[in-house]
Amino acid sequence: MLLFIVAFKRPNKIYDENSLYDYAVGALGRRMRTVAELKRLMRQRVPNDEMGTLLVEMVILRLKEQKYLNDSNYATAYSSFRRDNEKFGRRRVITDLKVKGVHADVIEKVVDEAYAAVNEEELARAFLKRKRLKKPQNDKESARIFRGLMRAGFSVGIAIQVLKHWDVDDEVLTALQEEAEET
C-alpha cells in the first residue's frame, strides 16, 4: 500500500464570486498586492475556462471599486519603502515593480516622484552603511562594492563617484566601468 504525503494541500476550486472575493480580501489582508499578483493567485482557485476568467475579472473590478486594489498606491508605497528603508536605487525599484506586474506608465510616474528630491550618491552611501561595507582595502573588495551598488539599482556613475571618494585606483575604476558596459 502506497501513501502519498503532500506538503501542501491543493487549493479547492471556487465556483462563485463571493467565495473568490472573500479569498482575495484575505490575500490582500495578509499583504499589499498588485492586480497582476492577485490575478495569479485567484487563477489557481478557479476553473481553467472562460467562466473562471470572468470570475477573476469580476472580483478585480469589485476590489477596485471599493479601493482595496490600486496599482498606483501600491507602487507609491513600495518605492518609498525601498528608498527609505532598504536604500535601493531607482533602477532596482523599477525592475522590482515590473516583475510584480505594475504597468510601465505607472512605474515611470511614481518612481520619478519618489526619487525627485533624492541625492543618489548620498543614498548609495546610506546603502553601503546599512550593509556595513567599509572602504575597500584592495581591488577585489572594490569590485565587490561596485557590483553591490549595481545590484542595488545605482548607476555606474554613482558607483564610480562613491569609489573615487574612497580613493580607489583609476585603473580599477576604468576596468569596472568597462565590465558594467559589457553586461
Image (spheres, rainbow, N blue to C red):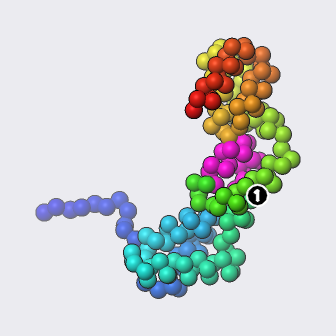
Give how far across and how far down residue 158 sits, in percent.
76, 32
> On screen, 76 above or below 137?
below
Q: Residue furthest left?
A: 1
Residue closer to the observer: 37 or 12: 37
Residue closer to the observer: 135 or 48: 48
Give how far across and how far down residue 1 sits, in percent.
13, 63
Q: Which residues are magenta?
A: 78-97
Where does the C terminus fall, quadrant-wise?
top right
Which structural element holds mark 1?
helix
* Residue drawn at (74%, 26%) of the image: 160
Is residue 82 magenta-colored? Answer: yes
In which image quadrant can residue 74 be found? bottom right
> On screen, 132 above or below 50?
above
Left or right of 109, for residue 46 = left
Left or right of 91, for residue 26 = left
Q: Is residue 152 visible?
A: yes
Residue closer to the observer: 32 or 103: 103
In which image quadrant can residue 15 be found? bottom left
Give how far across and how far down residue 121 sits, in percent.
80, 34
Q: Which residue carries the number 1 mark?
A: 109
Report the magenta stretch's main SS.
helix
How would you rate the neighbour count of disc 1 (Cα within 10 Å): few for under 14, some for 14-19, many for 20 or more?
few
* Residue drawn at (51%, 85%) of the image: 17
In which image quadrant can residue 143 be found? top right
Amino acid type shown at disc 1: Lys
Left or right of 33, for residue 82 = right
* Residue drawn at (28%, 60%) of the image: 5
> On screen, 56 above or below 163?
below
